[in-house]
Image (spheres, rainbow, N blue to C red):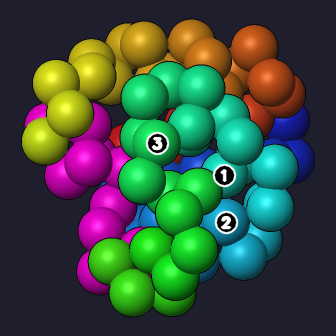
Amino acid sequence: MSDKTIDLNDTVYNICSAYPEIKDIMAELGFTDIVKPGMLNTAGRIMTISKGAKMKNITIDTIRNKFEANGFTIKE
């Protein structure tokens, strides 16, 4: 089991602060706004991956598979 665990209900800001590489993985998944200047420090402080997935119509399975392929464990 990986020691890099992501809680999908934690804020994007907290997750990206702990694991900066998450930002690029999220952009690849379709969360393109996260790489825009200032977005992480504003919306990222209240947005969770779960909420963002619903807004962007990205399945949790797709997210889980991508993060696991990059060495992360998902906590829901």
Which residue is label 2 attached to? 16
How far, Cα to Cα, is label 3 from label 1? 9 Å
Question: Mark 1 belongs to which amino acid?
Answer: Lys
Which residue is label 1 attached to? 23
Q: Report the front residue among 46 and 8.
A: 46
Please tell me which residue is depicted at 42% across the width and 13% down the height of the picture: 62
Indicate the position of residue 39 as horizontal and vertical percent values.
45, 74
How far, Cα to Cα, is label 3 from label 2? 14 Å
Say the numbered circle drawn on residue 75.
none
Magenta span covers which residues?
44-54
Which numbered disc flags the more N-terminal residue, 3 or 1? 1
Marks counted in the figure total 3
Question: Mark 3 belongs to which amino acid?
Answer: Thr
Q: Report the front residue among 48 and 29.
A: 29
**On the picture, is 20 further left or further right than 64?**
right
Question: Mark 2 belongs to which amino acid?
Answer: Cys
Residue 1 appears in the picture as rendered? no
**On the picture, is 6 further left or further right than 71?**
left
Indicate the position of residue 31 as horizontal and vertical percent values.
42, 40
- The answer to whether residue 25 is above or below residue 29 is below
Residue at the front extreme, as displayed: 37
Q: Is residue 45 magenta?
A: yes
